Image (cartoon, helix red, strand yellow):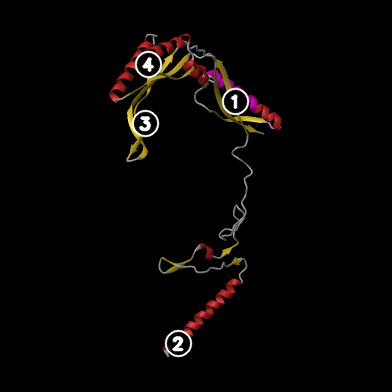
Amino acid sequence: MNVLKSIVVTIGIFGIGILAVACGGDDEGYTTLPVSNVAASTVGAGVASAPASAVSVQNAPISAVGGPVGTGTASPPQYATGSTNAGIWVTGTGEMSLTPDLVLVRLGVEVTSSTVTEAREDAAEAMEAIIEAVKERELTDEDIQTTSFNIWPRYEYQEVVSEGVTSNKRVLTGYQVSNTAVIKIRDLDAVGEIIDDVATAGGDATRINGIDFSIEDPSAYTAQLREDAVKAALENANQFATLTGVTLGKLVYVTEVSDVPVVQDFFAETRALATAFAPTTPISGGSLDLTLTVQAVFDIW
């Protein structure tokens, strides 16, 4: 009897559920989304909750991208009509041609000997003689800077015959020591003579690795270069506006591409080769170009 009552109660509850679903589906404005394999989690005191995709939505608002909220369907993207790059972007460069007032000579010594001690001592003696020679030309310790010092072994491959088999064996033949430095010369007329003095003092161990002409204090010309660069940027912006038929608005951004003027020396490599091989060592400073570039952005109307 108890079993029969349980079956009747169960059938009654199931019928009520079917009727509720049928009536709910007829409500205007409601859409029930299908859900498969939804695992309900227990919330609070035994209340089952389901993911948002299982929730019925009434009069769902349209989102900014054109799709109903909560539907989970893909919608076409909305493209912005504006851009952070709107406006006129230009650069302007200030240039100045100057006579160099500073010469950087990269020199050094290189010695090879059978032992490290002999090679180091010979290199030290040659470098000391060079330093004394340049100091006699009124260069100071602040004008001489060591850039590298190296000691490494020297090997040769010799043919060795052992038990009738010929092979090449690496054999230690000595050690090589090099010491390089950069000297600053402000008297351009004396550069050739100083190089000759260096070669005489260091003898066969002397190495001239290059020569560069520069401006010792390019910041002294920064104000003028910056002014010229800004003027060039304004001219470029006005020309763009005229060519494109727009009205140039206010300046919204400006910056220097480089913090300090760039010294460009187009003949340094040629002069370095001439210095290394010319018997009388003629040196010509020529001219240098200083450049400073700015970038500017303007509104347009």
User: Circle 4 sits on which residue?
Assistant: 142
Q: Residue 283: x and y, percent?
A: 50, 12
Residues at marks 4 and 2, CA–CA distance in whole angstroms:
110 Å
Q: Residues within 10 Å of mark 4 (few under 14, many from 20)?
A: few
Question: Could you say which disc has been placed on residue 156 in the image?
Answer: 3
Query: Which of marks 3 and 1 precedes in the sequence?
Result: 1
Q: Mark 2 or mark 1, which is nearer to you? A: 1
In this orientation, which residue lies closer to the viewer: 32 or 30? Answer: 32
Give the residues drawn in magenta, as a range.
223-236
The quadrant of the picture occupied by the C terminus is top right
What is the quadrant of residue 194 in the picture? top left
Q: Residue 76: x and y, percent?
A: 62, 54
What is the quadrant of residue 106 in the picture? top left
Q: Secondary structure at mark 1?
A: strand
Q: Are marks 4 and 2 in contact (CB under 8 Å)?
A: no
In this orientation, which residue lies closer to the viewer: 45 or 3? Answer: 3
Query: Which of marks 1 and 4 precedes in the sequence?
Result: 1
Q: Residue 79: x and y, percent?
A: 62, 47
Q: Residue 153: x and y, percent?
A: 34, 29
Q: Secondary structure at mark 4?
A: helix
Does the magenta-highlighted stretch encompass residue 228? Answer: yes
- Left or right of 292? Residue 48 is left
